[in-house]
Amino acid sequence: MKELTILLLERIGLLLVIAFVLTRIPNFKALLYREGNKKITIIHAFIFGLFAIAGTHLGFVFEQGEGFRHGFIWSVKPDQMVISLSLIAVVIAGLLGGPGVGLGAGMIAGIHLGFLGGVGWLANVLVNPMTGLLAGLTGRFFSKARVISPIQALFIGVFPPILHMQILLILYPHHEQMLDFVNVAGLPLVLSNSIAIAVFTAMIGVVLKEQENEAAFATKQALTIAEEALPLLKSGTLRDQADGLAHLLFERLHVAAISIMSQKEVLAFKGLGADYHNGQLQLTPLLKNALETKQIQTAYTKLELSCVHPECPLEAAIIIPVIEPNDTTSLINLYFRKPQHIRPVELMLAQGIRQLISKQLKVVASENLQASIRDAELRNLQAQINPHFLFNTLHLIATLFRIDPNRARHITIQLANFMRFNLGIASESLISLEREWEHVKAYIEIIQARFSNRIHIQFHSNRIPSHVLIPPSTIQPLVENSVQHGLKNVKENGRIIISVQAKGEWLEISVEDNGIGFSSEQIKRSSWLSNPKKTHQGVGLNNVNQRLIGLLGERSRLHIENLPTRGSKVYFTIPMETREKPT
Amino acid sequence: MNFTYFLFFICIIACALIITNWAAERSSTTFQFYTAAGRLTGIQNGMAIAGDYISAASFLGIVGAIALNGYDGFLYSLGFLASYLVVLLFVAEPVHHLGKYSLADVICTRFPSNRTRFIIAISSFIISVFYMIPQLVASGLIIRLLLHVDYSMSVLIIGSLMTVYVVFGGMAATSWVQIVKTILLMSSTFLLSLIVFSYYNWDIRTLIDHVKVGTPLGDQFFIPGHLLSNPIEMISLYVALILGTAGLPHILIRFYTVKNAAEVRKSVLSASWIIGFFYLITLVLGLGVAAVIGYDQLIAVDSTGNLAAPLLAKALGGDFLLAFIAAVAFTTVVAVVAGLVISASTAFSYDIYHHIIKKGKTTEKEQLRAAQWSALAIGLISTLFALGLKNSNVTFLVSLTFIIAASSNLPVILLTIYWKRFSQTGAIIGLVSGLVASLILLFLGPHIMHMENGWILSEPIVHLYNPGIITIPIGFLGAIIGSLLFPDKKQIDFDSFYMKAQMGMDIRRDNR
């Protein structure tokens, strides 16, 4: 009995080596992930069934009078009996995959043993499926977790050989050989089986733990990336941001390539094939889908990626749409060399990055908006006490009193209006266009009076719709900009045209002058207009722009252009019907 | 049996107990200690009830009784099974609705007084101790068979081991041990019975022919009248068995471990199925023993028949099967003892310590401590008793417990739930008279007073081995007459009590 035990343990050692190698194959881990559907059950049953067959061949042959044959099992004579190790694999199948997998694997093992034949073949045929089924049910019953603990497995592993012995006794009641066999082989089988099952369960536990660690790592990764991305997202132009982000992601994630795209073009590309992936964006169905649904898309074939380059090494990709606060969507694409490289961990990571970066963008945007609003308040505060403006205007009024007291009185009232508006400005984020218009008018009258010989200001407007909403003090800075910069050096015939025109659902408001216009650098920068250097000129326009985008959306951004003749035009559109955007 | 197989035996028991440890880690509050926190499902609880109920007496004793006495042995099985009808129809649901931890809760919902609580606690205590004795006897016999150590030694070891086990495990652990034990016991006995059938080529007539050869009774084997010659004894035994279960505290507190009345019904039904099936198996095993081993050989090993099942296993499957079946029997004993200790220590720590001594002002921790101490005490007391009782068939010892339960607890429970004019004094009188009457009659009966091998060597005063037919009516009469003579001064609202008992406006909800 002792000899048999040691032999069995040796054989089980071999079996466990095979099992260990199995668990090291990356695809085996993938097997543990997916469960619940019929196909997987059948595949699992098949794999464990093969494993059980291996266990059978690693067993021995028992022959009455001659004891045990030490070789592996290849064929069995009618008076010999198989001592199979298949039950180990079958129990594991049941514990791991549930009753279905256990039964399936048991049936495969049982049928194979049935064909091998020998004494007790019927017991072998019966006990394997039964054990698989029972082990599956037991596993379900004892533990809600997917893999039960090794000690529990040890406990459960004691019983299958006992069942086997009892079935042998039921089927061969008067067989002297059988009673001998049960007494000699029963205990060693119980011992070796339960140990093997416990060790195997522990092995699977290790694999699962590795997976859990991977998941934890992915989470941590996403968080680190988000944290490091924050300073990048705050600074520079959109292209700089994209470059920085692509760089960061490429460094942090072990992917073949990274690209970041706006809706129109590839902003940055890093990694394999960087030379031909830049430039104009060709909108593949997958990208389109990602932009429309705003859901993560995965490409598992080259066809789906439809790269222009015929020998592109990238075969798979995860496409992550990132929603920016102004409702445009950018895409971050993670490229992989092989579709198998996309594991659930990567998908989880993508999900995490998408959410975190969207959040970060929102944070950055709201910080910008807050800053702009603070700026506007500050500016108006300055305007309230702007000594130059005030003194000049007072001086103007003093002069006018002698020439035209009525006009002087009118200007005084306008000054009062202007000042009063400035006082109330901080309290609301959107006001009616009518009130804004009053403000602009007051300002213009004062300016007009001051520079009556230099600047002429015109309105082009049929009618100011009263219900349209606009951020306060939006138009006045544009006029001020024209007066102080565009027409700074114009001695006479300066002209400012302010027009308000309805264009469908939208209202276009523009301020034109015939001054020096903008430098080309200013215009270029204005198309990003995120954080221009604080040159004196840019501040006012940029502040207006930020508030327009922040409060009314991307379509209301400020446009700047030079007129073909001379001078410049600054314009923006606001919606006729505004629902206030929550910030 | 050699030492290797003894290790195997130990290993299987250890396996069964490991589960208890997992469960025990979670059981720390009183509520969990007593009732497994109401988290078992109906079927699980049914298995646990079956586990509590199928004691060593049933497994070892009945197989032996059938093998020795034929039809009369089977009578015990029938009685044990039929008693579940009484439980299901009259007692199970009201007990669930009215109680929280102990049996006394049920009675005290109607008669809230410490005196009632005290007496019920005492009777629960006595019943549990009585029931525990045969379990210990059985386990002692098994150990003796396996290891050939002295009987008293094995009883001492087993008694203390089991007590320690319950002290640290609590009810959650015991519930799981019951469930595991039920599964183990059912499957192993079922397979053993299949081996018996296959031994006789699946032909029942061959089996019966061999039975007739194996037993000295011959054809008489299948006819009543060997064990109980007197029809009064037979009726008496039957009445006690059928009514007894509904008065067993360790079975009744099982109905607290499920969530609602539907689960209670489900648990009683599944328990009845399991138990019924089990007794069919024991019938086969009993016949198998008579046929395979034969009367003479059985008597030679153990005159009480208690070791019939292990001997059968050895004959059919060698030492391997013997060790396994013995381990299963042993687990059975552990499980039942655990349940009994819990019910007895609940009676002490919750009813007497918490409610009476400390007036309901104890922390859960103190109660748990008290329960553990009382579990220890109970273990010791029953071990001492078991030392003196090795020469009895354990089924027979169990039936004595049933007599006490049926005469004391049952009348009070039934009348409390169903009789409007029942009074507190009536309850106390009924309990005391039933308890005292059954104890006295047992003392004066042929178990204790016996000319040849009794504790008191004299002619018994009462000749009935089963005095249930006298004591059970005494219990009922005591309760009824007591109530009529001393009605309660202020009547409680019986209708709303009855509603609560039957419909379950669950009083336990306020206490969670």
Image (spheres, coloured by chain):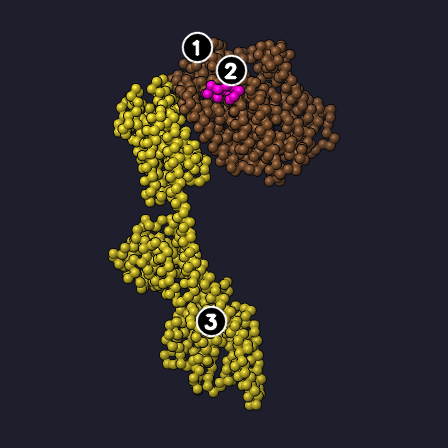
Query: What secondary structure prevails in the magenta region?
Result: helix
Whether residue A454 is situated above or below residue A463 in the rendered picture:
below
Mark 1–mark 3 CB contact (< 8 Å): no
Chain to which mark 2 belongs: B
Q: Is residue A346 visible to the viewer in this orientation of the structure?
A: yes
Q: Secondary structure beneath disc 1?
A: helix
How far apart are labels 1 and 3 at the CA level?
A: 111 Å
Q: Which label number is shown at residue A135?
A: none
Question: Do pointers 3 and 2 mark residues of a single chain?
Answer: no
Quarter of the rendering containing residue B211 = top left
Whole-percent x, y for residue B480 in the image: 69, 23
Dot 1 amino acid type: Val
In the image shown, does A75 or A37 lie closer to the viewer?
A75
Chain B shade in the render = brown
Quarter of the rendering containing residue B463 = top right
Identify the residue at image location x=48%, y=28%: B181
How far apart are labels 3 and 2 at the CA level?
A: 103 Å
Dot 3 amino acid type: Asn
Query: According to the image, label 3 marks what residue?
Result: A543
* Magenta stretch encompasses residue B296: no
Dot 2 amino acid type: Thr
Give me the chain that's yellow: A
Q: Which label number is shown at residue B213?
A: 1
Write down the region rendered in magenta. Answer: B140-154
Query: According to the image, label 2 marks what residue?
Result: B304
Whole-percent x, y for residue B64 in the image: 49, 17
